[in-house]
Amino acid sequence: SARADQMRTTLKSEFGAFCDALAAGRSVGLAPLRLQYKDFAVWHNRRLEDEILRLRVQRYWEERVDGGFPRLELPLNVGETADSRQGAAYRYFIDEEMKRRLVQWAESERVSLFTLLFALYLQLLGRFAPQRDVLCSLINSGREHPALLPIVGFFVNSVLFRCTIDGDEPFRRFVQRVHREVLESLDHQAYPAEKYFAEKNIPYPEVDASFNMLNVNQTAENVQLTPFAPQHQPHAEEVKFALQ
């Protein structure tokens, strides 16, 4: 997100200032932070006690819990054990022209590039899983207020996102619907879904797919990525979702 980008820019700027000062043998006079992570923790815990917020989020989830959450029926080969956490990476680079066209299309529809890519991801899930109702996790930076941008800390929030995939729905209309539903889900993220499910004694749903988009500024002008170069790279790292 733009806010995550701003935080990274701030950290890089401060890190560069320290390096330059160390090389020059002088001290750095950075302005003190207005807030610390502990301030965020206190503020967040107080928000959880807000009865109006709790009731609003409760109404939101009651509409979505009706009928239960569908388990994503992915065509998986999990190996020897069903709880295997060993994952593999598949990297696919697109060139600048394709990126430009994606950004242009998103701007013409008045949605973000994030929304467009997330809509494409949901369509992919709809092709993998033979079902109309899909459930996935939407990773959000969790920095809802600009004052949180320069603070180092783990603010990431995993937001449940339930979506109906209709093969007959025009893609433009689908993107607009995803745009509205993403904004609505983020608007209710302040009160964790886990807390709501615990209060209602409802088992937290199994989530097999997750989506995240990181805006990473290119750090070196001479770095060149090979366009359209797929790579399948198994690794031993633990993964949290079957598909992410």
Image (spheres, rainbow, N blue to C red):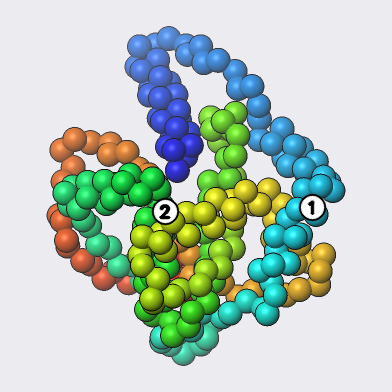
- Is 173 in front, or is 94? 173
- Residue at image x 60%, y 28%? 147
- Asked if one can make out residue 153 in the rendered structure from this viewpoint, the answer is no
Determine which quarter of the picture holds residue 226. Answer: bottom left
Disc 1, SS: helix
Rendered position, 178 above or below 5: below
Q: CA distance from mark 1 to mark 2?
A: 27 Å
x and y, in percent, of residue 200 in the image: 81, 69
Residue 19 percent across, percent down from the top left = 38, 22
Q: In what element is the residue under mark 2?
A: helix
**Residue 108 rendering spot, x and y as whole percentages:** 31, 46
Residue at the outermost top position: 26
Q: Residues within 10 Å of mark 1 (few under 14, many from 20)?
A: some
Which of the 4 image quadrants contains residue 227? bottom left
Query: How many numbered markers are drawn?
Result: 2
Image quarter hosting the N terminus? top left
For the point 15% across and 38% down, the residue is 222
The residue lying toward the viewer, choosing from 98 and 3, is 98
Residue 54 is tagged as 1
Is residue 201 positioned above or below 15 on the image?
below
Looking at the rendered structure, the kind of residue marked 1 is Arg
Q: Residue at x 64, y 52 (%)?
A: 189
Taking the image as drawn, is residue 79 in sight? yes
| Residue under the point 78% across and 66% down | 198
Residue 169: percent from left, percent from top:
40, 71
Mark before the other along the chain sequence, 1 or 2: 1
Give 113 or 174, whichever is nearer the viewer: 174
User: Which residue position is annotated with label 2?
Assistant: 115
Q: Residue furthest bottom?
A: 80
Tell me the quadrant of the picture where the C terminus can be found.
bottom left
Q: Name the image quarter holding residue 44.
A: top right
